[in-house]
């Protein structure tokens, strides 16, 4: 996981990472990721709630990149949330963009440390107290993937009160022939096990 993230982040920095954009139903994609992660959340008795203001919304994006963005944010939310908590995933579609929010009630991040968590290998001081919980490279990759789509990522957090990551993505230029893609099933179980390997060993 660390090697893959490092390679991809380096490619994005050098602008050699090629996005494979297609028309995707972002509502279906995010909901499928939430469903696939539920088994890992249940191991900490964490409930994930998904809410959307539309049943379907087509955007032009790289499916694998979107998968990694949402999965990383969810794995972090589970990782740093105490047991018996709730994580809220909200999707709000507007005319020319979509906002995806992942909100937890975990330890939160101090205001003075919020900017640096998107830097490679950086982690908030309080998150370092949780032994073995990642390298800090994941959010760096998330930030690059979001920006590669012409989007942005925002963090709202208070120490000991949880965090909310909000990803905004443009609709983009849709293909003339509309294509809808389900989440890739290729090695999905293996991908999930790798993503959550630093939580459940």
Image (spheres, rainbow, N blue to C red):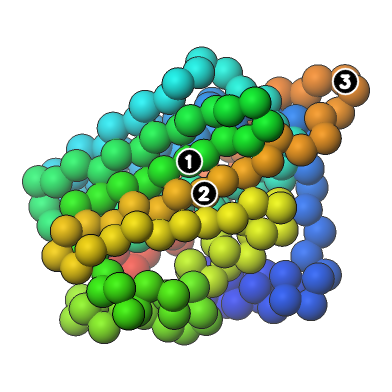
Q: Earlier in the sequence, mark 2 or mark 1?
A: 1
Q: Which residue is mark 1?
A: 100
Corner quadrant of residue 140 = bottom right
- Foreground mark, 3 or 1, reads 1
Residue that carries the numbered disc 2 in the rendered image = 167
Q: Which residue is mark 3?
A: 177
- Residue shown at the point (46%, 32%) measured from the top left: 91
Where residue 154 appears, as percent x and y from the top left, is 47, 57
Earlier in the chain: of badge 3 and badge 1, it is: 1
Label of residue 189 in the image: none
Total marks drawn?
Answer: 3
User: Upstream in the sequence, badge 3 or badge 2?
Assistant: 2
State the CA–CA distance, disc 3 to disc 2: 27 Å
Q: Position of residue 179 (x, y in %)?
A: 77, 23
Tell whether 83 sits left or right of 131. left
- Residue 116 appears in the picture as rendered: yes
């Amino acid at each position: 996981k660390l090697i893959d993230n490092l390679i991809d982040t380096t490619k994005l920095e050098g602008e050699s990472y090629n996005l494979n954009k297609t028309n995707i139903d972002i509502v279906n994609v995010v909901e499928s990721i939430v469903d696939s992660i539920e088994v890992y959340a249940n191991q900490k008795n964490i409930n994930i709630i998904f809410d959307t203001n539309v049943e379907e919304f087509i955007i032009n994006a790289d499916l694998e990149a979107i998968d990694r963005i949402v999965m990383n944010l969810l794995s972090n939310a589970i990782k740093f949330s105490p047991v018996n908590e709730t994580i809220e995933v909200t999707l709000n579609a507007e005319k020319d963009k979509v906002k995806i929010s992942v909100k937890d009630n975990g330890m939160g991040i101090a205001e003075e440390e919020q900017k640096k968590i998107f830097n490679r290998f950086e982690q908030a001081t309080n998150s370092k107290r949780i032994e073995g919980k990642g390298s800090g490279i994941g959010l760096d990759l998330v930030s690059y993937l979001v920006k590669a789509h012409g989007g942005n990522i925002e963090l709202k957090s208070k120490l000991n009160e949880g965090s909310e990551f909000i990803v905004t993505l443009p609709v983009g230029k849709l293909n003339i022939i509309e294509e809808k893609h389900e989440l890739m099933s290729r090695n999905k179980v293996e991908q999930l096990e790798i993503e959550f390997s630093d939580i459940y060993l």
